Amino acid sequence: MDAEGGNISADGNGQSAVDAFVAHRNLLFTVAYEMLGSAADAEDVLQETWLRWADVDLPAVRDQRAYLVRITTRLSLNRLRAVGRRRESYVGPWLPEPLLTAPDVAEDIELAESVSMAVLLVLETLAPTERAVFVLREVFDLAYDEIAEAVDRSPAAVRQIAHRARAHVAARRPRGVVSPDESRRVLTAFRVALETGNVQGLLDVLAPDAVLLGDGGGVKQAVLRPIIGADKVARLLCSTHVRVETMALHPAEVNGHPALILRLDGAIDTVVALRIDDGLISGVYAVRNPEKLSHVRRETTLRR
């Protein structure tokens, strides 16, 4: 059997290795994605995780799930440090890679919040080890001693890191949990205003200090710096409507939340995700980089 790039026999310990990896694959992908904000990088980490796992002496492993998470975390940390240097030279704002997610992700409120575009952007402001500790503790509820093994720190140090990271994220994440019904209501109003080029309609749903970020990756046209203020954001979005009369906006579940997929001539052109605070849109995130749009063509399964 070929499991994620590795050939292995279909009996004995080989089959056990395959079964364990497949059983936990969605969990491992979610860990890697939350640490990296990139589905492509998360898939690469899973390939490396499989190669390491295929060589493990399984009878010596007490907890296969914990062992796999530890491998994935260490590999994700290595990649996060490497991609961090690449992102410094990225053209324009860098946004996480959007995922088309199944409805059950939205039903897990904590998971949906943790993979939202807004929270992933907050996680980008953490140091790599802080991000790993926060994700493993706050999202996956791992014990401090398990996290300590994964990040090569003492349990006492991990507790301190977790406290610091928790406070950092709490000060920057969206205020309160937005219900799916409220998200859909705001998204519908936003969509109608976009489709009709209604500046006032956008101003009605945008927070006064709303921010628009665009990610074209230097390949597609996008704003190269944040656009701040409801009036500026609304007028820019409506000017786009005038230029692109053939666009079609489709609602979708992206990263566990209602979002819009913009198609031009039937092809996916942009994914628009929103941050909502106190019933108003405080963040508009438009991902146009073609390299980041492959995971909105099919649903991605996320698990805790």
Image: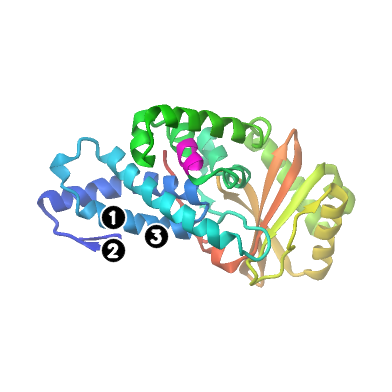
Q: Are marks 3 and 1 in contact (CB under 8 Å)?
A: no
- Look at the magenta stretch and give its main secondary structure: helix
Give the side of residue 107 with respect to residue 204, left or right.
left
Pick the front one: 219 or 27: 219
Q: Are marks 3 and 2 in contact (CB under 8 Å)?
A: no
Q: Mark 1: which secondary structure?
A: helix
Q: Residue 132 magenta-drawn?
A: yes
- How far across and how far down the image is residue 238, in percent? 84, 59
Q: CA distance from mark 3 to mark 1?
A: 10 Å
Q: Are marks 1 and 2 in contact (CB under 8 Å)?
A: yes
Q: CA distance from mark 1 to mark 2?
A: 8 Å
Query: Which badge, 1 or 2, comes first in the chain's sequence?
Result: 2
How crowded pointer 2 is (Cα within 10 Å; few <14, some 14-19, many 20+) is rated as few
Q: What segment is highlighted magenta in the picture?
A: 129-134
What residue is pinned by disc 2?
A: 5
Q: CA distance from mark 3 to mark 2?
A: 11 Å
**Residue 50, label in figure:** 1
